[in-house]
Amino acid sequence: MKRRTIQSKAMPRQGGFISHFIGWVFLKLFGWSIVGTLPDEKKLLVIIAPHTSNWDYIIAMAAKFYMGLRVRYLMKSEINKWPFRSLLKWTGGVPVYRSEKTDILEQTIDWINGQENVWLGMSPEGTRSKIDKWKTGFLRIAHGANIPILVVGIDAPDKTLVIDKLVQLDVLTGDLTAQAKTLRAYCDARFTGIKPENQ
């Protein structure tokens, strides 16, 4: 398996030999490669697109274990219970509480602001089914926490996970819907999902 990535000094780290080996075995077994350069940012939002299959999550997990990278993700608080709690925490899950007075996006922004070194991963689509447009929640989080966005593409024909580019918020223009449309057009032009019919 090829890996042409450079680990950044600022990235949050996780794991050791065992998790690295698990990630390597999966990627090697299924023929996936990782290319690109990880940015030197202590805080950022990682968007992974296009999200068209359940395999996307598994590939992303294998990649982050292989690179020793700790990327967090949001999960429903209802599943943050025994016997899943330890596993979900190990894989980077962050519980969000829908019963709280503040909405999930505000909870997430507050949580990011309270962290010193954190990368949060999200799927802009919010679903693996075909949709007309991307949701804007990820942009609200990035703007609210004032963190850049790292674009990671799933390019299924080449079986490559592409660490593509870092987008600073000041280059995004227009309202959030327009910003989401611009980022989706960029990803659709460059990457093809595992199930392109859902893209």
Image (spheres, rainbow, N blue to C red):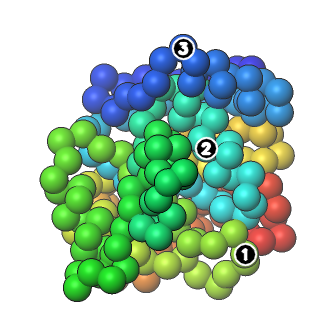
List the single residue furthest toward the front. Answer: 82
Pointers 2 and 3 in contact (C-beta within 8 Å): no
Crowd tier of the residue under label 3, counting other residues whose Cα lies within 10 Å: few below 14, some 14–19, many 20 or above: few
Circle 1 residue: 129
Q: Nearer the viewer, mark 2 or mark 3?
A: 3
Q: Nearer the viewer, residue 129 or 92?
A: 92
Q: Amino acid at mark 3?
A: Phe
Q: Earlier in the sequence, mark 2 or mark 3?
A: 3
Query: Viewed as shown, does residue 128 lie left or right of 124?
Result: right
Q: Name the residue rendered at 81%, 64% in the picture.
A: 196
Q: Position of residue 59 (x, y in %)?
A: 68, 42
Circle 2 residue: 60
Q: Amino acid at mark 2?
A: Ala
Q: Position of residue 72 (x, y in %)?
A: 41, 48
Q: Give the SS element for disc 2.
A: helix
Circle 3 residue: 17
Crowd tier of the residue under label 1, counting other residues whose Cα lies within 10 Å: few below 14, some 14–19, many 20 or above: few
The answer, for residue 139, to whether it is visible in the render is no
Q: Position of residue 112 (x, y in %)?
A: 24, 56
Q: Give the SS element for disc 1.
A: loop
